[in-house]
Image (cartoon, coloured by chain):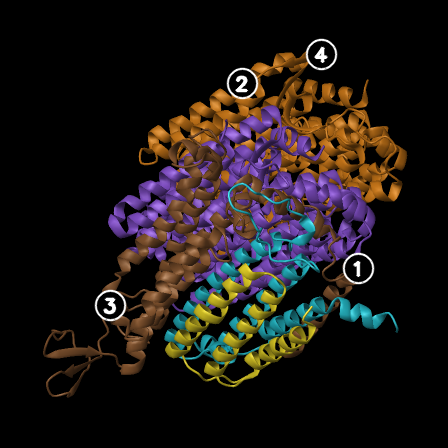
Chain colours: A cyan, B brown, C yellow, D purple, E orange
Amino acid sequence: MTDLLPLIVAKYNYWLYVILMMIGLYAMIAKNNLIKKVVGMNIFQTAIILFYLSIGYKKDATLPIVEVGHEGQEAVVRALDYINPLPHVLMLTAIVVSVATFGVAMALAVRIYQRYQTLEEDELRMRLSEE
Amino acid sequence: MKFLGFIVVCLTGALLLYGTGQFPAWGDPGSPASTHLSNYYIEKTVEQTQVPNIVTAVLADYRGFDTMFETSVIFCAGLTCFLLLRDFTEKKERFYRHRPTGVILHVKDSEKVLKVGKEFEHIDKDFVPSDLIIKTVCRILIPFIQIYALYVVAHGDFSPGGGFQGGVIFGSSLILLAISYDLKTLVERIKEKVLGIFAAVGVLIYVGIATICMPMGGNFLNYGMLAPLLPGDPRHVRALGMLGVEIGVGLAVMAVMAIIYINIVSEGRHDEGL
Amino acid sequence: MHWPIDLIVLTFVIFCAIAAISVKDLLGTAILFGAYSFMMCLLWAIMGAVDVAFTEASVGAGVSTVFFVAAVFRTSRRTKD
Amino acid sequence: MDNYPVLIVVTPLLAALFAGLAAWIEERLSYPIALIGLAISTFSAFKVLMRVIASGTIQYRMAGWAPPIGIEYRIDLLNAMVLMLVSSVAFLNLIASYKSVEQETNDRAASFYTVYLLFVVGLLGVTATGDLFNLYVLIEITSLTSYAMVALGDRDRAPLASLNYIFIGVIGASFYLLGVGYLYMQTGSLNMADVSRILQSHQGSSIVLTAFILCMIGLWIKMAFFPLHVWLPNAYSYSPVAFSRVVAPLMTKVMIYIMIRLMITVFGYDYIFKTLHLSSAVVWLATIAILAGAIMALAQKNLKKMLTYIIICEIGYMVGGAWMGNQLGMTGAILHILNDALMTFAMFLAVGNIVYKIKDVDLSNLTGLFGKMPWTMAGLVLAAFSIIGVPPTCGFFSKWYLILAAFEKGAYQFAAALIISSLICAVLFFRVFEICFFNTDSKDHEHGNGHPQIKIEEAPVSMLIISGLVSLSLIVVGLFSGTIVNTIILPFLK
Amino acid sequence: METIISIKPLLAVLVSLLVIPVLVSSSDKPNVRESWTFIAGIIKFLIVLSMLPAVLQGKQIVLTLFKIAPGADIAFRVDALGMLFALVASSLYIITSMYSIGYMRGLKEHGQTRFACFFALAISATIGAAFSANLLTLYLFYEVLSLATYPLVAHHQDAKSKRAGRRYLIFILGTSIGLVLPAMLYCYHATGTLEFASGGIFTGQLSKPAATVLLLMFVFGFAKSGLMPFHSWLPAAMVAPTPVSALLHAVAVVKVGVFSIIRVITGIFGVHFLLSFNLGALVAGIASVTIIISSCIALTQDEFKRRLAYSTIGQLSYIVLGVALLTPKGMTGGMLHIAMHAFGKITLFFCAGAIFVATGKKYISQMVGIGKRMPVTMMAFLIGSMSIIGLPPTGGFISKWYLVLGTLEGDQMILLFVLLSSSLLNAAYFMPVFYKAFFCTEEESMFEDKIEEAPMMCVIPLVITALISFALFFVPQPFLNLAQLAVKGILGG
């Protein structure tokens, strides 16, 4: 038990990401309202982004922006001083993808509401089976 | 469904927790992720590209190919919203305000559209904002927001930010205009056609810059080959290439954000809305 | 490490996430969702991912929320769960 | 410097953008632009294929950065084949689509072509890339465009189908992304070859195992492998014909390709079959998938819906073959990627022609079609035979390899499932043929004198020619399957 | 054995395939269309015939088209057995085309172009099956034949033909996909080849139970051979127009089934292999049961074509029986019976069709006195039925003679008994027809005076086939030589 606590503390970001992801996934599967599902989807995606950024984090390191001296006085850059930039890059892309999906999902929700006047899945299913 | 969802979620969670067991400690500088590739980027970026913001450099140069498609994704999202929602038919039910008297006319189911001018004013059915304070504040704020957006785009090489963030901020300023006044104001100022062309042109700038590198003798996206075309220090050519690309991204993102907003909020009719 | 801040933000993130999917009013969900995004963005800023945090602040807390409200405006606030 | 590999992907992208611009300036220009873009792409794919066959794997460095640093295109025989397949199917479909797009999306055809091209860009990029994250971005492009396309179909039901597709698609893509994250955490790299090299020394790691499971589940969701298939039937059957003709043959097949690519190039045979021992379990799953797909297809009353369930059944073939763990199985799976894409394409081309004429393809509406649309039906019959697995159509030969692989591994249940599904497909299609061949309202006339002369009402020539060509290619590809196996698949697997 | 590489087998297959587009394009000019059918038939026959001398000299003509997998190509090989079958099928195709012109026009059938096209396709597949060099190619043509025949069976497009077509497909396609395909793939898996070899391809890979199961899968899987219990498609398929029943369901289709069984027994398993496990007796047993039962059922059928169909089922089993005896004489008899039965049975079907064209009657009980109105037809019928029963002086006698010799050679007294008793049954179900047709008074006759012979195009073919049946008794050489050559090749003598 003694080494469990440090383990939990040392990786709490990862635990958090798992929890968020489970929340998001649960909302996507179990929620009845389509917009709620979209929210779940977004939580799910941000959880993954959190995971990636946690991979990239480095203790005692600073932002991945190199401090450059003026005109040619380039200091020696030590890799240990800077946070890993690659996950940031990847996650920028992921955020863009998620907002794109979000926009499309919202547009679809509006379309569905136009047609059926409801966003509740059970009511939609009822309407569909009526037709 | 709830129960099934719960089980699926628990299984996923268990799998992820299982995977977490052997993770390197959080923030460990010696983990593989922080040593294999990232060191190269951190150490070589400035030397190779003259761009201090490593994220921008990796985004627009080393992994510029990803970003090109990311921009295409955004373009595609805008196009999708347009395709899904855009409705060119006029709404049958309309409201007009008679300016001199302030009487509101409710026109139901009529093909005839009243002439909007000095006498009559077309007003929204659902939402009529008319708050002087908000209008005035936004009027003052919007230009500053837009300048800030341009700054974010242009300064992306040196500080956090870049084409995408700048584009979103610029787009937000347009949305703010629509919210504080009304949708018609925005649509009149920036035509749908302009937005559509901006979106395509933005991505085209990116792909175009990338493509030009090929006839110049380099691989796709190799900004280094653009040196003969660009003025200034050839060492900065990559930074310039990235700037060009970021401008393209910004343009596209700005347009797409506005397109998505306008289409969603007006159900594709571009007349009334939040 | 600013672990107290970190911890507070973490708590908020989870709180907002759960609240966002369980509030029975979609407009409320929209706002909570914006708050969630913003908390997330803070968390990332703490972790040194400024670019990502910047993006999330403008996208997640900004534009997405606006899209959300716009969609709710055109559909309905009603939700059963 | 030779830029063909990137031209395969970039020309359609450029064409998409120009077509998008043309939508606002001169709408009629967008179709020729799209056509030219895909033609160049197909030509480049052909060039690349020839070069790869002649001189082996091609590597192309984006922006000139060496592989683990930058993104590379690594095109070997398998990629080259799939690239050729995707680009030519997309190109042919575009030719055939002109009329049906006009019919289905009258006022926004230009935007349709833009989205269509972006979809193709996504598929091509997914196939060509050698970078795990680039793959994700391109999967998202394909997904996003397909959400859009699906939603454009049937006015009433398509948006809901599309939204459900989004939810499941996002889960799938996110699982894949997570898997890549786990891999990145273990290796610090995103380049497939590099990751594979580093993974050699982490065979027992739980991170790698989780990554593997996540990637596979993600891809299975994306390819609609049986228990995860729920989104596919609605999404494919409500989408516009011009799109379902390209998504049905290509989307799932490209996903299978990715699965095979991950299995062979990234994780490696040894890891999957010697370290994990998951083979039998997945083959059992595939067996169930095949049977379930076939049985669900039996319950359908709509031709398009029925075909979508057959796709699910075919996915079981390929997954089972790939997981068989022997060379024959992999050969069968890869060959079936090609064959299934072609036969589904032929099938949907024919169905597209029918939809063009009679809108609703409920089985009860199809009476007398053999008389009305003989050429279309000929194409349909050939495609159906290929799906049933009648020699010499190509469907038979991939089945041949798959069953042999099952025998070799001793997975007799899989072989039995293949044969049963063939029989069920035969029942399915002959049910359709019966409806099309016999007039239900025909009186009990003794000797055919009462047959009214049915007027031929065929689809437009542009659609017919493509349909006929593709259907004939089923036989040609079938007869040359030995050549394909020997020049492309076996050298690749060696 | 000497082999010649030649494109002729391919040509023989392709001729009628290539003529299909021509037929389609001339669909509104019936005379042009029919002459093309003829020309194709004759060219096909000539090509087959031109290969005969080489085959009779003991050479084989081979051609490999496509390499699919090692040991399983799409390839042709013309040997004596294939030659025998191809000769029968292609010669009868010409005669049947002539007959079908008379029949189809006489009845003003619809969809004649479609009919001609699928007929051409079917005969192509038949020739292809005859010339197949390995099981894969054989299976390919077998399946093509099954599918090409479906529109012919269901030609009338009414409810009855729908049912018949459905039954036809369930039996033929179901067995070929469900039984033959796995069996074939298992063979390939076990041996790595599907090439027909005179000694079989198995070299001890199979235990007896496995071999039994595999053999049964093949024997029942080739359901076109009509072995019970997979026979009932054949009577059902009699709803098809008579030319179809005549050529396909008396000659081409059913014989392809039997031919495939012979190929599997001799080329895949090998005679010695089967002898060592005593599996020949099993097949022979199934065949004899089929012979007896089908003959008994034939007695009860009143519809003329159905009676013929059950007779066909019995006769096909003769062939299987003969080959399953695994003795030289028996196999010769079986193979010879392919030819002899073909000429006899096609005559009978032609007669049934001619009667139908002339009078519209389908049932035997309605045919009282027809012999007086259509004497030529009924005389041909007599010769045909004698050939089937096995009475001299018709060709049927020769094959049956060899079969009997075969049973004696193999000491199979039960089988001998089966053969003889079934001959009696044959006579029992054919002779009443003849009796009804001729031996009745003028009052009993069911026919008006105005009834005449069917059109010339119907009568000439049946006269020709009857004469050939007759002539084969005196000149059985080409077929007999081929059969003996084939047996010699198989037994490695």
- Foreground residue among E56 and E428: E56
Please, what secondary structure does the residue beneath circle 2 have?
Answer: helix
* Residue under disc 1 on the same chain as residue under disc 3: yes
Query: Of tags 4 and 3, which is closer to the observer?
Result: 3
Chain label for disc 4 = E
Which of pointers 4 and 2 lies earlier in the amino acid sequence? 4
Q: Amino acid at mark 4?
A: Glu
Is residue A102 rendered to the left or right of residue D357? right
Helix, strand or loop status at disc 1? loop
Residue C66 left/right relative to B67? left
How dense is the environment of label 3, judged by Cα within 10 Å: few (below 14), some, or many (20 and up)?
few
Chain of the residue where label 3 is placed in the rendered structure: B
Which of the numbered marks, if any, corresponds to residue B22?
Answer: 1
Residue D351 is situated, as x and y percent measured from the top left of the image, at 43, 51
User: Who's the residue at 73% across and 52% down the image?
Assistant: D186
Residue denoted by label 2: E47
Q: Quadrant of the C terminus of chain B?
A: bottom left
Give residue B243's position: percent from left, percent from top: 43, 47
Crowd around label 1: few <14 · some 14–19 · many ≥20 (10 Å): few
Give amino acid for label 3: Thr
Element carrying mark 4: loop
Q: Which mark is residue B89?
A: 3
